[in-house]
Amino acid sequence: MRLAPGPAALLLAAAAVAALLADRVLPLAALTGVLLAVCLRVPGGRYRPYVVATASSATGVFLLWPLLQTTGLHVLWEGPVVPVLGLLDVTQEELLLATVYSLRLAAVGFAFAAYALAVDHDRLVAAAGFARRSALAVALATRLVPTLERDAAGLAEAVRGRGVEVAGVRGRALLLSPLVAGSLERAANLAEAMEARGYGRAGHSRAPGSRWSDWDRAALGAAALLVVAGALWL
C-alpha cells in the first residue's frame, strides 16, 4: 500500500504536529516508533544519516535537559555547584520532561526523514497546483540532503577507483569542495531548465495526476484525528 504524495505529506505533517502537542510519554513513544519503522522501510540504507542525526540530537536533549533545568522536588542525584549554571541535580520531574522533549524531537525528525525519503516530491509539486511555487521551493530544499549524499557516494567511489581511500574526517572533508562546486552547477542547470520550460510565466500546463484511492482518503482522516488527539488526549 502506497499513498499519494499529498495525503502522505499531510499525514506526516499531522504526526509531527501531534508529537509537538502531546505531553504523555507512552503515546509519544508509540508515535516515534511508528515513524522510525516507516523510515527503516526505505531501501538501500538511505535512512541511516537521518536516523543517526535524529537519534543523536534526541539523546543529547535527554542527557542535557535534567542538568540545565531546575524543576521538581524529588531529587534523584545531586551534583556539584557549577559557576553560571548553579547546582547540578536530577529530579524525577526533570527526567520526565527530558523524555517528553527528546521524544518530541525524535518524532519530528523521523517525520521529516520519512517525508524526505519516501514521498515523491515531483508528484507532490505537480499535485499542488494552488501553491506551485511554494511546493516547488519546499521540494527542492527537501531534496538537497539526499542529492548531496548521492553525490558524495559517487565521488568517494570515483576516488576509491583511483587507489585513494576516503576515510576519517579529514578524508571526507576533501569531498566538500567538489560537492559545493557540483551543487552550484546543478543549481545553474536547474534554473536554466526552469526558464526554458516557462516557469513563472502566466498560464501553465499540468500533467494529469492519478486519482486518490480509499487509502488516501483514509490518510486525510487519520491526519485530522492525529492533530485532534494530540491536542486533546495525548
Image (cartoon, rainbow, N blue to C red):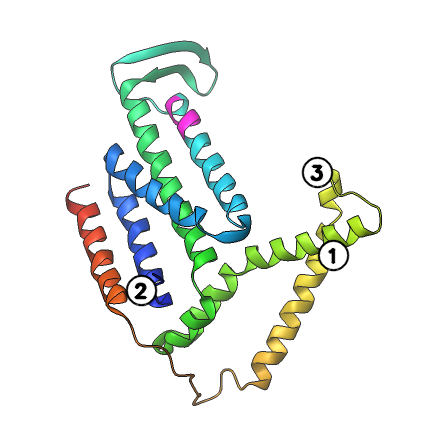
* Residue at numbered disc 1: 178
Depth check, mark 2 against mark 1: the one in front is: 2
Q: Callout 2, which amino acid? A: Pro
Of 90 and 47, which appears nearest the observer? 47
Q: CA distance from mark 3 to mark 1?
A: 16 Å
Q: Nearer the viewer, residue 37 or 140?
A: 37
Amino acid marked by disc 1: Pro
Q: Which residue is mark 3?
A: 169
Q: Position of residue 141 (x, y in %)?
A: 51, 61
- How far across and how far down the image is residue 7, in percent? 31, 64
Q: Disc 3 residue type?
A: Val
> Residue 30 location in percent, x, y?
29, 39
Q: Indicate whether residue 63 is drawn in magenta.
A: yes
Q: Which residue is mark 2?
A: 7
Q: Disc 2 or disc 3, which is closer to the eye? A: 2
Q: Nearer the viewer, residue 46 or 83?
A: 46
Residue at image point 36% right, 46% down? 35
